C-alpha cells in the first residue's frame, strides 16, 4: 500500500472541502510549496495535488506552483483540476508532472482524449472516477453525469489506461472511513487496474482495511490536516 498525501489548492492556499462543497472550506496552510516540502521531509515519494479553483472554473490556475515544486523538490506529482484540453495535458507533461488526473474532460471529450493517446503515453493519465451513487460526477463534483463508474472504467481500460482514481463524494472530507465495498466491487470487475482509493480515510486502520481489500494506493488528505494520522505514522506507507 502506498499512501499519497493530498494538497488541495484554492486561491493559492491549502484547503479542504466537505463533500466537494466550495461553500464549506477550511484553510490549513498558506504556502503550497512549504506543505509539499513537509511531505517530502517525511519521506513521501509522491503527492496528490488538486486545483480546486481549476475544477470549478475550467482552467488550470496553479502552473506556477507546480513548476516551483518540481524545480525545488525531488518528489513525484499527480495533478488534476481544470484540465480541459490536450494542450493542458501537454503543458503539464512539459513542466514535469508525473501523472495527469483527467476528470470532466474524460467525460466531455472522450474522442479527443483517446486520439491523444497516439502521442501521449496512456500511462501518464489517471482517469478520475468521482462518483455520486456510482455515477460519474464532473465539473468539480457540481454535476452528476449519466455515465456509470463501471462503464467509464471499462471504456478507458480498453483504450490502454490502467490508472483510475475513485472518489466516493459522499465520503470525502467527512473522516468517516473509505468506501471499502465500492473498491471491492471495482476490483472484482477490474482486478488488473491500478486503483487509487480516495475519500474518507480517517485512521491507520482505514489504510489497513484498504490494503486488505487489495487497494494498492490511497489518497490521504483531511486526516493529515486534522491530526487524525501523524505524518510519522503515515510514512510507514510512503
Image (cartoon, rainbow, N blue to C red):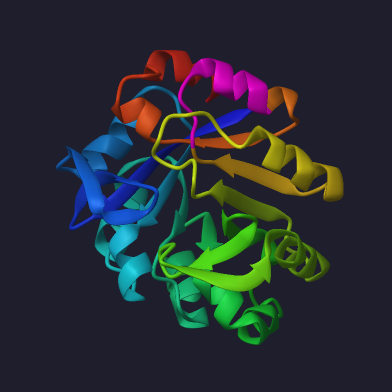
- Quadrant in the picture for the N terminus: top right
Front position in the image: 87 or 192: 192
Residue at x 37% of width, y 19% of height = 228
Classify 149 as above or below 2.
Answer: below
Residue at x 52% of width, y 25% of height = 238
Chain part drawn in magenta: 200-210
Q: Which residue is farthest left? A: 30
Query: Residue 128 placed where, x, y %?
Result: 57, 59
Is residue 68 visible to us here?
no
Residue at x 30% of width, y 29% of height = 225
Total number of numbered discs in the rendering: 0
Residue 62 in magenta? no
Front position in the image: 124 or 231: 231
Is residue 224 visible to us here?
yes
Query: Residue 192 placed where, x, y %?
Result: 83, 47
Magenta span: predominant SS is helix
Front position in the image: 103 or 101: 103
Query: Residue 226 placed where, x, y %?
Result: 30, 25
Residue at x 79% of width, y 64% of height = 154
Query: Residue 231 placed where, x, y %?
Result: 38, 20
**On the rendered structure, is 115 left or right of 190?**
left
Residue 206 in magenta? yes
Amino acid at each position: 500500500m502506498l499512501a499519497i498525501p493530498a494538497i488541495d489548492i484554492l486561491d493559492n492556499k491549502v484547503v479542504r472541502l466537505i463533500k466537494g462543497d466550495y461553500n464549506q472550506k477550511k484553510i490549513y496552510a498558506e504556502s503550497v510549496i512549504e506543505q509539499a516540502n513537509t511531505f517530502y521531509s517525511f519521506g513521501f515519494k509522491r503527492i496528490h495535488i488538486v486545483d480546486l479553483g481549476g475544477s470549478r472554473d475550467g482552467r488550470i490556475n496553479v502552473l506556477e506552483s507546480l513548476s516551483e515544486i518540481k524545480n525545488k523538490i525531488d518528489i513525484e506529482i499527480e495533478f488534476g483540476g481544470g484540465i480541459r484540453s490536450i494542450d493542458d495535458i501537454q503543458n503539464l507533461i512539459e513542466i514535469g508532472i508525473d501523472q495527469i488526473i483527467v476528470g470532466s474532460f474524460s467525460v466531455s471529450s472522450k474522442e479527443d482524449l483517446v486520439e491523444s493517446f497516439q502521442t501521449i503515453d496512456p500511462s501518464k493519465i489517471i482517469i478520475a472516477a468521482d462518483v455520486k451513487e456510482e455515477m460519474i460526477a464532473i465539473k468539480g463534483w457540481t454535476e452528476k453525469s449519466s455515465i456509470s463508474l463501471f462503464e467509464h472504467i471499462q471504456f478507458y481500460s480498453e483504450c490502454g489506461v490502467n490508472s483510475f482514481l475513485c472518489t466516493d463524494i459522499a465520503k470525502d472530507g467527512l473522516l468517516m472511513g473509505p468506501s471499502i465495498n465500492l473498491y471491492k466491487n471495482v476490483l472484482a470487475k477490474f482486478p488488473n487496474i491500478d486503483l487509487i482509493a480516495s475519500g474518507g480515510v480517517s485512521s491507520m486502520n482505514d489504510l489497513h482495511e484498504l490494503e486488505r481489500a487489495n487497494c494498492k494506493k490511497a489518497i490521504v488528505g483531511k486526516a493529515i490536516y486534522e491530526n487524525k494520522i501523524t505524518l510519522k505514522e503515515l510514512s510507514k506507507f510512503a
